[in-house]
Amino acid sequence: MVLTVVNVVGTSKVAFCICKTLFANSEFEPGFVVSRDIQRANWFVKNLRCGLPTTYEELSELSGIVFVAVPDAVIERVFSKIKPRMTGRVCVFHFSGFLSSSIFDVDDLDWGRGSIHPNMSFSDIDVALKSMERCFFGIEGNDYGMTVARKIVNSISEKFIELDESSKTAYHLAAVIASNFVTGLSHLAERLYSEYKIDRFRDIIPQLIRQTAENISKVGSVKALTGPVSRGDWNVVEKEGQIFKQNFTEYSQLYDVMIDILREMVYESNRKENKRNGGF
Ligand SMILES: NC(=O)c1ccc[n+]([C@@H]2O[C@H](COP(=O)([O-])OP(=O)(O)OC[C@H]3O[C@@H](n4cnc5c(N)ncnc54)[C@H](OP(=O)(O)O)[C@@H]3O)[C@@H](O)[C@H]2O)c1
């Protein structure tokens, strides 16, 4: 039997966007929304337009699906607080990309456990809501948890991969590199626009990132590389290196490290090309 009532513990942005899409598109139904503060539970329910707001103190029983939607550092602690109030064959999930679901100590109870990690940034709820139906999830869990997790992600976007507990950390690190590091690098680009009084950063650079992402999606990272390193324009590489180091004295090594990575990509691409042409 697949459960359909979904309870949310913690008025998180991720839980809000997942629930908003899930309840609009499927037979899943809202249950309790549990918060440390009833005002925040009320706000969540009002904007979700469904659910029963409550607090940890008022909560009597939880059954069905439970989303433990709190920061990674407190998932385990919050779970042990609500566990005594769970009844029936519960299925409990968190949304962390880093932690596995084995932090939920439920296997001796025959309950489901899983993690459902959306590969998305939730810094802006409106942007996130618009992207939910295209969101790619990484799911992991025990057998029962996986059955329910597949049903949940199929009701949102139908896009997911199934992860091994042992690969979760590397999987999350890849997301950090590709999303957070790119945001950090974009911040340096924004600082240059500002320093040299160049207009329209927000029109130009995000579009460049989007188009680069499209190329990566089509041909992979190595082949998607363009620019001075891939062309062998070493004069440009050297001059831009000087400007980088003048402007970002605090991160001056970053330029050389990045150039080394790009150079290695060019070698790899050439090696593959030579092999295809029958060389060594
Ligand atoms: N943000 C992202 O872009 C993103 C992307 C993918 C996955 N995730 C994962 O999604 C999960 C939730 O992240 P989020 O960004 O949605 O969180 P969030 O918006 O910061 O909300 C977390 C909620 O947890 C509760 N909370 C905060 N501190 C707490 C504490 N010390 N003890 C108990 N409850 C506490 C709060 O709810 P109440 O005040 O109502 O109790 C808060 O609204 C995390 O596991 C995160 O790794 C996040």
Image: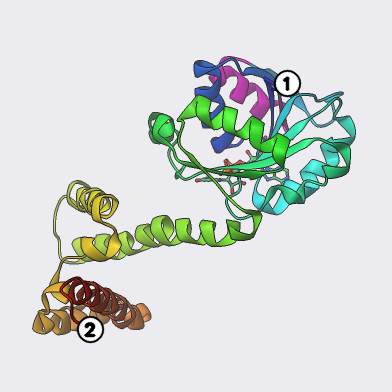
Label 1 packing within 10 angstroms: few (<14), some (14-19), many (20+): few
Asked whether residue 39 is drawn in magenta, I would say yes
Residue 23 visible here: yes
The reply to whether residue 249 is in sight is no
| Closer to us: 120 or 274 | 274
Using the image as rendered, state which of residue 65 and residue 11 is in the foreground.
65
Looking at the image, what colour scheme do you see? rainbow
Q: What residue is drawn where x is 69% and y is 22%?
A: 2
Q: Secondary structure at mark 1?
A: loop
Which residue is tagged 1? 1
Q: Judge whether 238 appears above or below 262 on screen.
A: below
Which quadrant does the N terminus fall into? top right
SS assignment at label 2 = loop
Q: In the rendered structure, which amino acid carries the disc numbered 1?
A: Met
Image quadrant of ligand 1?
Answer: top right
The residue tagged 2 is: 280
Q: Is residue 166 above or below residue 236?
A: above
Look at 51% across and 61% down and name the residue there: 173
**Residue 170 placement, left or right of 178:** right
- Image quarter where the C terminus lies is bottom left
Say which quarter of the image contains residue 99: bottom right
| Position of residue 41 measured from the top left corner of the image (x, y, whole percent) | 67, 26
Q: Return the x and y of residue 105 as percentages of the image width and height.
A: 82, 47
Which of 217 and 25 lies nearest the eye of the viewer?
A: 217
Picture residue at 16% right of the left edge, 78% below the top: 240
What amino acid does circle 2 point to?
Phe
Residue shown at 69% from the left, 36% from the top: 145
Q: Is residue 112 magenta?
A: no
In the visual, does 177 lie left or right of 93?
Answer: left
The x and y percentages for residue 125 are: 45, 34
- Which segment did they paint magenta? 33-50
- Note whether 18 is above or below 181 in the view shown: above
